[in-house]
Amino acid sequence: MLAFQTVWISTNMNHSKDNKKNEIILVTGGLGYLGSQLIRDIVAVNPEITVRVLDNFHSGSYRAIMDLPTIGHYEFIEGDILDPHATRRALEGVSTVIHLAAIVRTPMSFDRTTWVEQVNHWGTAHLLEACLNAKVQRFVFISTTAVYGPSKQSVNENEACLPQGIYAQSKRQAEIAINVAGKRGLQYTIFRLGVLYGLAPVTRFTSFANRFAYLAGIGRPLSIFGDGRQKRSLTHVRNASEAICLVLTHPNKISGKTFNLVDENISVIQVANIVQSISSHAVFHFTEQDIRTHLSFSADNGLLRATGWQPKISLQYGMSELLAQFQNVSTLPYPNKILDE
């Protein structure tokens, strides 16, 4: 049996007397990697908006709600999307839901399938039903380009989805549930996100690009699986947040559509070379692992660019910014192999 605890915190950052009249946007999973950036960018776009965050701290961080902007108004509920009481309370008075909460896994992962399916698919389905009951106007969902499955060429939003691995499969099932809710009157937008990287208030170092920066920063070698020519779709966290904010600035341009939210498609070895160009002491080596790590994922971003969005932060700048966070770390030689004592 699942146990939930719901904690409500309201912090009036701008001391407005009319906060009850402000538009309320709910961000689920708002204390995670992308959420920590997004909740700041929303009030930068419109300081009159109330940002309400629902998060269970599974992968979120307390740092995300520390040192928030002095403009805007924030409300926080410590709770879970699987808890109907928490979601019902969180949706009160909400006009727009931005659904980030999810169990994140690598595209080909088959780890803890029931849990991932429960949160990513059924958690989204229950949230959609609650949104319809609460008369929420708009629903923004963060999916993944992994729903297409491995591909040798860039795929667009019209391509058939052949997800492999429970993470991609659960996200695709959530997309289908959203399309059904759309037919029932809920305005929606789906963003299929590439591999997220870059500096944010709460930065996660599990993606390969961020991991490369971390390893180079502490003087460890970068491991490249296979020959490194496999491609990945990369998205800087701040570029992603800016695209999601289109729901505030240009809702009609994105309503009822699905977009690949991708900066560029690039090989793993190219990212390693960029890291090495920034940090001259960085070294990498090639290793073998599961054949699934050799597969390529590549997605076209033309449809999103047609809205006027374009990535402002380049990979070179994004990786430089990350590596700069480790500039005061003294690196020591790292052994090539473990020696017996």
Image: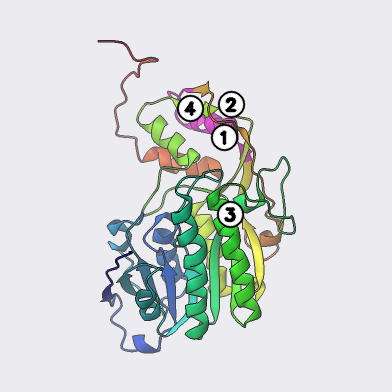
Relative image position of residue 148 (x, y in whole percent): 66, 51
Closer to viewer: mark 2 or mark 4: 2
- Position of residue 212 relative to residue 148, above or below, is above
Q: Is residue 286 left or right of residue 162?
A: left
Q: Are marks 2 and 4 in contact (CB under 8 Å)?
A: no
Residue 262 can be seen, yes or no: no
Q: Crowdedness of circle 2 by 10 Å Cα count: few (<14), some, many (20+)?
A: many
Q: Amino acid at mark 4?
A: Ser
Q: Quadrant of residue 40?
A: bottom left
Label located before the other in sequence (1 or 3): 3
Disc marking residue 293 = 1
Name the mark on residue 223.
4
- Label 1: state its secondary structure: helix
Q: How many marks?
A: 4
Q: Compute the Cα span from label 2 to label 4.
A: 10 Å
Q: Residues within 10 Å of mark 3 (few under 14, many from 20)?
A: many
Task: Tell us which disc is closer to us: 1 or 3.
Answer: 3
Residue that mark 3 sits on? 169
Label 1 packing within 10 angstroms: few (<14), some (14-19), many (20+): some
Q: Is the residue under label 2 in contact with that under label 1 (CB below 8 Å)?
A: yes
- Magenta span covers which residues? 266-284
Q: Earlier in the sequence, mark 4 or mark 3?
A: 3
